[in-house]
């Protein structure tokens, strides 16, 4: 059961806060814990190819939007 | 809840304390019994889902729905809009699970797991889309308040000051509740539709049969269709909701209510979107030129059907939609940049501790607001195009989301089921298909 927090809505920044704060939050919710990177995952060749294909799709579609804009403004 | 590991006591920040305070209320509500306690727990946990869905019913989206009703009346697009919100729910539900399970933002996860090369592509898509959309939000603010004779500089400047006031409360909870109040304004479209005395028979027929279909599938039709998809499924929503879930402090125990929050948001947003099509459907018989697709012109054109009050409420609701979305979209950019630059990124920090976060948020909004005030800008075209850009940037964003939500190291037991993976694949194919049909229609001229 978590410790009781101080009665005021915005608790003071003291070491006494640590007990109830650590009781209320999961360990990996703390700002300090979230500073640690999760680490890279290895992407398969298929995934990398798919990422490049979708990147090409975005570039192509941006050109299409440019054509549409040019016509609308012209 | 994972126990805090033994060892030295970790550093506790201001952000941690504020979040812990909110979590204690949730833990107490969860420990209680009875219907009121459950309602209280729901009240504490709702927010990100409603905000993201009603936030995406933004000024360009409502103007896209208005254009849909004006061009096609009541028919195919009513059930189509509902389908797009089903797609949005499928996608956004995954961000709830990601945020609650790993307590990290979306941009941070992409950079961590796929490296900065792919990360910067994703972030570039987000920031470009967000900036253009922010401009469109201020266009909506300007046009909505313009109906009441308020000058552009007062409308846009005033909206920016409200945005700054809401985000700088230094408390996620206060920001969320204030923004939820603004989100309620989006529901104004529903009573306006009811009081416009629409043909409920035609609406019911459209929902059941998807008829009548558009008479021609030309470039304008595809543009409207893609803009309507972009009005519900966009990259900023992924980054925003996951960031808000993390900032709010949701945990795996909260995923069920987080899902309900998202479903409730999708339902309310779909109702408001369909209501907007119904409101502007009478204009189908009195076509407006594209250059008049702004809130003020729609409100003026609707006066014969809605009366002065109804038209005024319509214009006000467009303003409110722009203001709400400007807050949400600027926040999503600030979350993402803060995560990537490893700077503090929480609405639970006071301004002096979160200078980069608040600086990015306010600077982006200020520049977008200033652009809207430049004379001669093609504002009407920009409003429809931003939704199209959002759709086109979505497939790569969904691939990252798919990979993350199946990554056991990131999400653990909350990873995607086969059914959800299939639904995600269908959403990607639908977006790609709509984009390619739109491209063909443009290139064929």
Image: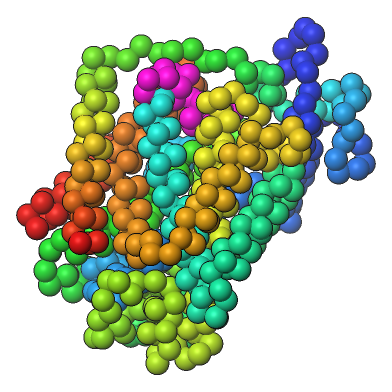
Q: Is residue B389 visible?
A: yes
- Up-down: is B214 above or below A39? below
Residue B257 x/y as whole percent? 58, 45
* Closest to the observer, B238 or B82: B238
In the image, the segment drawn in magenta is B98-118
Q: Residue furthest left?
A: B444
Q: What residue is at 42 percent from the left and 19 percent from the top?
A: B116
Q: Is residue B319 visible?
A: no
Q: Residue furthest front?
A: B375
| Horizontal arrangement in the rendering, residue B275 relative to residue B149 (left or right) | left
Q: Quadrant of residue B250?
A: top right
Q: Main secondary structure of the magenta part?
A: helix
Q: Quadrant of the C terminus of chain B?
A: bottom left
Instruction: Look at the image and say whether residue B201 sits in the magenta stretch.
Output: no
Residue B65 x/y as whole percent? 35, 67
| Horizontal arrangement in the rendering, residue B43 relative to residue A57 (left or right) | right
Residue B87 x/y as whole percent? 35, 49
* Closest to the observer, B40 or B47: B47
| Horizontal arrangement in the rendering, residue B246 relative to residue B325 (left or right) | right
Report the number of numbered marks.
0
- Up-down: is B83 above or below B246? below
* Closest to the observer, B330 or B154: B154
Q: Residue furthest top?
A: B7
């Amino acid at each position: 059961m978590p410790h009781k927090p101080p009665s005021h809505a915005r608790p003071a920044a003291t070491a006494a806060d640590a007990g109830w704060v650590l009781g209320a939050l999961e360990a990996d919710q703390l700002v300090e814990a979230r500073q640690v990177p999760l680490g890279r995952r290895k992407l398969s060749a298929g995934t990398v190819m798919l990422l490049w294909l979708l990147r090409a799709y975005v570039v192509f579609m941006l050109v299409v939007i440019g054509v549409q804009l040019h016509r609308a403004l012209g | 809840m994972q126990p805090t590991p033994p060892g030295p006591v970790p550093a506790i920040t201001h952000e941690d304390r504020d979040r812990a305070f909110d979590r204690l209320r949730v833990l107490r509500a969860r420990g209680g019994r009875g219907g009121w306690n459950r309602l209280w727990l729901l009240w504490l946990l709702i927010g990100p889902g409603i905000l993201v869905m009603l936030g995406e019913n933004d000024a360009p989206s409502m103007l896209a729905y208005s254009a849909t009703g004006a061009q096609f009346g009541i028919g195919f697009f009513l059930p189509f809009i509902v389908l797009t919100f089903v797609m949005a729910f499928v996608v956004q539900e995954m961000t709830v699970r990601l945020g609650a399970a790993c307590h990290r933002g979306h941009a941070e996860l992409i950079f961590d797991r796929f490296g900065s090369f792919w990360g910067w592509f994703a972030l570039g898509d987000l920031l470009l889309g967000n900036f253009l959309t922010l401009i469109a939000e201020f266009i909506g603010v300007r046009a909505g308040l313009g109906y009441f004779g308020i000058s552009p500089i007062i409308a846009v400047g005033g909206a920016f000051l409200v945005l700054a006031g809401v985000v700088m409360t230094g408390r996620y909870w206060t920001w969320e509740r204030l923004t939820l109040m603004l989100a309620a304004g989006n529901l104004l479209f529903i009573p306006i539709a009811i009081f416009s005395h629409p043909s409920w028979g035609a609406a019911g027929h459209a929902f059941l049969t998807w008829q009548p279909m558009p008479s021609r599938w030309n470039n304008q039709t595809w543009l409207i269709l893609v803009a309507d998809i972009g009005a519900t499924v966009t990259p900023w929503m992924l980054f925003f909701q996951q960031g808000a879930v993390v900032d709010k402090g949701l945990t795996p125990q909260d995923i069920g209510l987080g899902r309900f929050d998202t479903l409730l948001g999708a339902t309310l947003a779909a109702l408001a979107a369909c209501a907007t099509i119904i409101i502007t459907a009478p204009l189908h018989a009195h076509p407006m030129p594209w250059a008049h697709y702004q809130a003020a012109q729609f409100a003026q054109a609707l006066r014969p059907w809605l009366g002065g009050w109804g038209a005024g409420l319509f214009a006000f609701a467009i303003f409110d939609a722009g203001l709400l979305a400007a807050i949400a979209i600027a926040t999503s950019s600030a979350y993402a940049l803060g995560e990537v630059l490893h700077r503090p990124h929480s609405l639970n920090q006071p301004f002096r501790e979160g200078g980069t976060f608040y600086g990015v948020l306010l600077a982006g909004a200020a520049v977008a607001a200033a652009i809207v005030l430049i004379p001669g800008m093609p504002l009407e075209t920009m409003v429809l195009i931003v939704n199209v850009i959002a759709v086109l940037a979505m497939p790569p964003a969904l691939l990252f989301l798919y990979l993350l939500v199946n990554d056991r190291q990131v999400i653990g037991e909350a990873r995607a089921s086969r059914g959800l993976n299939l639904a995600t694949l269908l959403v990607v194919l639908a977006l790609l298909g709509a984009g390619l049909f739109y491209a063909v229609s443009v290139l064929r001229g």
